[in-house]
Image: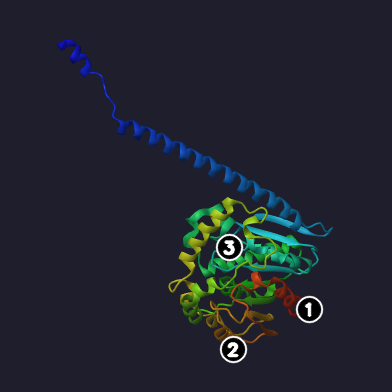
Amino acid sequence: MVADFEVKKKIPVYSDSLTWGIITVRRVISTLFRILAVAILLITVGLGFRAYRQHINAQILAIHTPNGIQEGMYIPIGGIEQWIQIRGEDRNNPVLLFVHGGPGASTLMFSSGWQPWEKYFTVVQWDERGTGRTYRKTGSSIAPTMTVDRMTQDGIEVVEFLRTHLHKNKVILVGHSWGSFLGIHMIKKRPDLFFAYVGTGQLIGVPTWKTMAMNSAQGFHDSGLGNNLKISPLMMPGFTLLDWYYFSRGYQLSQKHLLGPKGPMGKADLRSLGLDFSVPIFFFEGTQDFMAPLEPVEQYFEEISAPHKEFVQFEGSNHFLPLNRPDEFLKELCVRVRPLIVLQ
């Protein structure tokens, strides 16, 4: 009897609570696997739908005219490879170089609204040093070279490439926000390369920076960025998820090194470059631009001299005028800027 009792004591006995715990863990694991499977299915379906829409949108944006151009490429600029995109229905049209803002805010994914522009201009976009696809090639190693002087020279080299590649003597420069600050430096350094300059969301320097810093949150909140584009930026053909990643990384890098009170816009005023210009100057400005308000831009405009100058207000528009009102912007380009070029 004693031996039997001792043997029985060695047999493990599981309590009901332990058994229930094991069952619960299994149920939780099973539920997590189901959730993961559903998530994977939704992501797969979402990516598939995005790929389908991008394919359709590529057909919508494709250029089929006999003398058209549709190119995207890296070119050697300033000792590194930098990305440009060229689109237009007729190579004989004037070339329009769009210098994006941010700094670091590539406009490649936002440019579907500019498709009508391509009937009248060969539109060139450039991912600046530290931006988007250019950042993808270099990473953050080029951070020490991200200065106004270096990036101004980058812009000049882009124009020199376009002159050779597209067989043009001059181009139109459209500068938006940070790109307008950089654009003024470009036309002051090499006015011989430009038919005209169009600034929009024009930044001047210290006074504008202080106002911009105070109003940036409201400006972004009210911007309605991309509301009037033909194609959602998320569905822009050729713009991959990896492109979005590098856009984000480049934007952060550019903001760190170029924006803020210690950046170039916080240290300099465009007036220091001189107020005399040898090319036609146009400012296209939104009346509700909280990031680059009208008053300092109008004051600067009154101070400068140029062979021809015009200040055009867009009632109710904000800082992102060329993206949110591309058709109105094009109308003014065709009415005011293009005729001057045709005459030259």
Image quadrant in which you'd find residue 120: bottom right
For label 2, the SS is helix
* Between 53 and 72, the one nearer to me in the picture: 53
Calculate the distance from the C-alpha at mark 2 to the C-alpha at mark 1: 25 Å
For label 1, the SS is helix
Give the vertical position of 144 relative to 209 (above or below).
above
Residue 248 horizontal side relative to residue 124, left or right: left
Residue 144 horizontal side relative to residue 65, left or right: left
At 56% from the left and 86% from the top, the residue drawn is 295
The three-letter amino acid code for the residue at tag 1 is Pro
At 48% from the left and 38% from the top, the residue drawn is 33
For label 3, the SS is loop
The quadrant the N terminus occupies is: top left
- Of the numbered discs 2 and 1, the one sitting upstream in the chain is 2
The three-letter amino acid code for the residue at tag 3 is Glu
Residue 42 horizontal/vertical position (percent): 58, 46
The three-letter amino acid code for the residue at tag 2 is Glu
Residue, disc 1: 339
Calculate the distance from the C-alpha at mark 3 to the C-alpha at mark 1: 29 Å
At 49% from the left and 82% from the top, the residue drawn is 207
- Of the numbered discs 3 and 1, the one sitting upstream in the chain is 3
Residue 105 horizontal side relative to residue 13, left or right: right
The quadrant the C terminus occupies is: bottom right
Give the vertical position of 1 relative to 89 (above or below).
above
* Between 28 and 47, the one nearer to me in the picture: 28
